[in-house]
Amino acid sequence: MNRKIIGIKTITTMITLSIMIIVTNCSSMKVQSKSPFLGIYTINISENEIQEGNPSGSSSNLAGTWEFNLYENGVYLMTLDGQHVAEGKCIFTDNQVFFTDERGKLACDCAGIYKWSVDGKSLKLEKIEDQCNKRNFILTHHPWINKFEF
């Protein structure tokens, strides 16, 4: 992709996230400039779990060891068995996070909104709104376990 297309996609993403915050009545919530749970989180998903969950719209094998890297600048990076599969931007509020994928072979073309909670080293995400079934399946199937804090 050339820089002009990436720049347009980033601007579109930020406008979409801003609208989502307004539409979901987040105006009364405090928007946080950085993740309240920075670090690297991990989960394992088996082939049986994929077959049972059957995330429609996904032709890719989603089984394996996932890492979810959340950085201070609002960027996230996801890997599957050590291979980069998606990255994007996120905006946090008191109890919600808004994701938009920007690149990667498993990147989604729509934004997603999730409720988040942290219990010790465990990060749990619950879907509020997301049309991307594979992202929803991966983010919500298991609580994410923090293996490294930044």
Image (cartoon, helix red, strand yellow):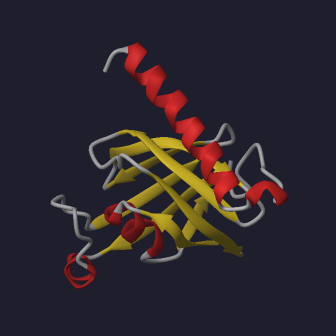
Q: Is residue 56 left or right of residue 78?
A: left
Q: Is residue 58 left or right of residue 35?
A: left
- Residue 124, percent from left and from top: 58, 74
Q: Is residue 123 left or right of residue 35?
A: left
Q: Does residue 70 show up? A: yes
Classify 95 as above or below 90: below
Residue at figure coordinates x 70%, y 51% from the top left: 35
Image quarter (top left, top right, bottom left or bottom right) of the N terminus: top left
Q: Does residue 149 show up? A: no
Residue at figure coordinates x 27%, y 71% from the top left: 55
In which image quadrant can residue 116 be found?
bottom right
Q: Is residue 28 left or right of residue 8?
A: right
Residue at figure coordinates x 36%, y 60% from the top left: 132
Classify 128 as above or below 14: below
- Residue 41, percent from left and from top: 54, 61
Q: Nearer the viewer, residue 15 or 7?
A: 15
- Residue 5, percent from left and from top: 38, 20
Residue at figure coordinates x 27%, y 76% from the top left: 46
In which image quadrant can residue 122 be found?
bottom right
Classify 22 as above or below 48: above
In which image quadrant can residue 50 be found?
bottom left
Residue at far left of view: 59
